[in-house]
């Protein structure tokens, strides 16, 4: 059921995904993955309290699940609890530094809170750790544009496009600087 639910998520059929994840949980109540998946689908449906319950249950089963911590961070951010969300994103990234989504979520939240210096520091670290990550350069370009650093924004957008010529975010930034 979990595999089929994952396909439903990819197809944005979240109700069907939730149903299949629930069946998978009924078959194996000790499995964390279907709870993580169901939590994600519930986030997409705006069912934040239920999504939080799924994430918390997954963490009881797998206390080192960076995905569950990240998803719970998304829930808390959408519930307007940014401090808790930031702590959860940070913990997810500490558990698995290669899990870039948690790192991006943390950076985006810091930017939305106006904590641009922290966001820039984290973007620089992300680029150092993943120099082939086009979106990291696009994110830094976006932040540089926010900070009025047009030359740096254009340079980073160019680096993002060199890595991924289809990076729409970077192309958009390039267009805004001209």
Image (cartoon, rainbow, N blue to C red):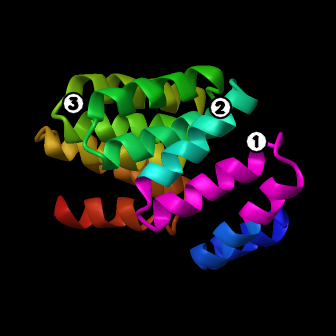
Q: Are marks 2 and 1 in contact (CB under 8 Å)?
A: yes
Image quarter where the C terminus lies is bottom left
Nearest to N terminus: mark 2 or mark 1: 1
Numbered disc in front, either 3 or 1: 1
Q: Quadrant of residue 146?
A: top left
Residue 149 horizontal/vertical position (percent): 16, 39
Q: Quadrant of residue 74?
A: top left
Cα–Cα span, label 2 and label 1:
7 Å
Query: Looking at the image, which is closer to me, 12 or 60?
Result: 60
Which labelled disc corresponds to residue 32? 1
Cα–Cα span, label 3 and label 2:
31 Å
Cα–Cα span, label 3 and label 1:
35 Å
Image quarter where the N terminus lies is bottom right
Please check the rendered image and state whether residue 23 is part of the magenta-colored stretch, yes or no.
yes
Q: Secondary structure at mark 2?
A: helix
* Up/down of 18 relative to 31, above or below: below
Which residues are drawn in magenta? 21-48
Which labelled disc corresponds to residue 85? none
Mark 1, Cα crowd under 10 Å, few <14 / some 14-19 / many 20+, is many
Residue ID for mark 2: 59
Q: Residue at x 55, y 53 (%)?
A: 163
Residue 52 horizontal/vertical position (percent): 50, 44
Nearest to N terminus: mark 3 or mark 2: 2
Indicate left or right for 65 with 2 as reference.
left
Nearest to N terminus: mark 3 or mark 1: 1
Residue ID for mark 3: 116
Indicate left or right for 42 with 26 as reference.
left
Most extreme residue toward the left is 148
């Amino acid at each position: 059921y979990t595999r089929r639910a994952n396909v439903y998520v990819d197809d944005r059929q979240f109700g069907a995904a939730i149903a299949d994840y629930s069946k998978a949980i009924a078959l194996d109540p000790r499995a964390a993955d279907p709870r993580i998946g169901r939590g994600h689908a519930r986030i997409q449906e705006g069912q934040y309290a239920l999504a939080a319950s799924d994430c918390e249950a997954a963490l009881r089963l797998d206390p080192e699940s960076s995905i569950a911590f990240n998803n719970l961070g998304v829930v808390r951010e959408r519930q307007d609890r940014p401090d808790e969300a930031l702590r959860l994103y940070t913990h997810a990234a500490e558990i698995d530094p290669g899990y870039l989504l948690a790192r991006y979520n943390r950076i985006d939240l810091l930017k939305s809170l106006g904590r641009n210096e922290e966001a820039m520091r984290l973007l620089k670290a992300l680029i150092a750790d993943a120099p082939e990550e086009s979106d990291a350069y696009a994110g830094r370009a976006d932040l540089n544009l926010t900070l009025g650093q047009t030359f740096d924004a254009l340079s980073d957008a160019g680096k993002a496009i060199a890595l991924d010529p289809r990076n729409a975010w970077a192309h958009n930034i390039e267009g805004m600087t001209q």
